[in-house]
Image: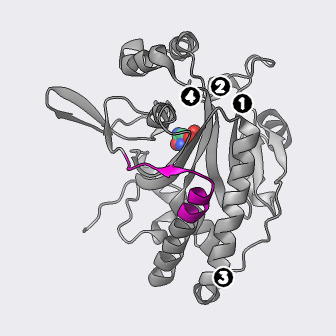
């Protein structure tokens, strides 16, 4: 079974690269250590090393690097290893690893609609390629993928909350038979880099994609805040120290272009494609919260 999962992962990576190259994207090499990284306010732990008199975070996501990279190339992507030291009991959710890889992409001057369509086409391309090249592996895993037909349905954060209560993401994923877009998160539940909708203050121009069949969140992204005065205001409103984001603010003052993008977790995508119960099964050397490893 492990060999089948590794083969599927390899086909997924190749197909995503091929699709994005055809769409004019340039692949960046990943950044693993950075003076500033994604705040992820809901993730309590901080992985840091000290070197050369400075503090280096292990990258939680390449969000700020993506915003800076689209100054140079208009369409970029990266297979980005992320470290997130989640609580030990999250090892049992089936969805969390403390080291995982996301396919992170960003498009200069794009809006949310454009990147949502791109995500749908990317997903369709990758799944078709896996069905063509991994039919034996899927059969061995006993997996039949649900048919995907974009555009995927959408539900707003508020609608989902009203319909399913506080555990709406879980409920949505369990009841869905197709991937579903969850859009328009309230400002206070997301990070400061998601752009507020100018015509609907308090609502963000962001989105998550939720897998059907209980597989949970697939990707998250949105339009970005790139104006220094707005970034500063949002950092302060979240009670974060401006000092920690000084390098981001000076980049924004030099000028960051407007952009939109998303990140899609590779292990979660393969988990969904293969229909296995835990993301750790996808990796040869899994990093499961709360567990130690031999290698
Ligand atoms: N990759 C996500 C994005 O592009 C950010 C994240 O992983 N927290 O919005």
Of labels 4 and 1, earlier in sequence is 4
Helix, strand or loop at disc 4? loop
Q: Is residue 110 visible?
A: yes
Q: Which residues are magenta?
A: 16-30
Q: Which one is in front, 288 or 127?
A: 127
- Locate residue 34, reporting x and y percent: 32, 35
Q: Residue at x 50, y 39 (%)?
A: 73
* Residue identified by numbered label 3: 132
The correct choice, above or below, for 23 with respect to 35 in the image is below
Q: Which one is in front, 294 or 146?
A: 146
Q: Give the distance between the C-alpha atoms of the residues marked 3 and 4, in whole angstroms.
A: 38 Å
- Locate residue 101, reporting x and y percent: 45, 55
Whether ligand 1 has any atom under 8 Å from the Cβ at mark 4 is answered as: yes
Mark 2 residue crowding within 10 angstroms, few (<14) / some (14–19) / many (20+): many
Q: Residue at x 52, y 48 (%)?
A: 104
Q: Is residue 275 magenta?
A: no
* Residue identified by numbered label 4: 191
* Residue identified by numbered label 1: 205
Q: Residue at x 74, y 22 (%)?
A: 197
Helix, strand or loop at disc 2? loop
* Residue identified by numbered label 2: 195
């Amino acid at each position: 079974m492990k060999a089948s999962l590794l083969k599927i992962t390899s086909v997924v990576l190749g197909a995503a690269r091929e699709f994005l190259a055809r769409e004019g994207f340039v692949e960046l090499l990943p950044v693993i250590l950075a003076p500033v990284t994604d705040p992820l306010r809901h993730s309590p732990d901080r992985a840091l090393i000290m070197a050369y008199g400075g503090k280096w975070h292990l990258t939680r996501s390449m969000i700020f690097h993506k915003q800076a990279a689209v100054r140079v190339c208009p369409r970029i992507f990266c297979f980005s290893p992320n470290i997130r030291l989640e609580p030990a009991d999250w090892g049992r959710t089936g969805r969390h690893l403390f080291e995982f890889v996301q396919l992170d992409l960003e498009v200069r001057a794009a809006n949310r609609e454009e990147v949502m369509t791109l995500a749908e086409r990317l997903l369709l391309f990758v799944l078709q390629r896996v069905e063509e090249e991994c039919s034996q592996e899927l059969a061995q895993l006993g997996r039949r993928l649900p048919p995907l037909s974009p555009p995927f349905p959408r539900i707003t954060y508020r609608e989902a909350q009203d319909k399913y209560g506080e555990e709406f993401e879980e409920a949505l994923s369990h009841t869905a038979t197709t991937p579903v877009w969850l859009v328009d998160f309230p400002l206070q539940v997301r990070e400061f880099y998601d752009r507020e909708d100018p015509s609907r203050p308090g609502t963000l121009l962001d989105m998550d994609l939720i897998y059907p069949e209980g597989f949970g969140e697939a990707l998250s992204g949105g339009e970005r805040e790139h104006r220094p005065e707005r970034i500063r205001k949002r950092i302060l409103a979240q009670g974060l120290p401006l000092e920690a984001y000084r390098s981001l603010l000076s980049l924004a003052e030099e000028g960051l272009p407007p952009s939109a993008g998303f990140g899609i977790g590779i292990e979660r995508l393969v988990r969904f494609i293969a229909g296995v119960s835990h993301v750790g099964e996808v990796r040869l050397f899994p990093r499961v919260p709360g567990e130690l490893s031999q290698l």
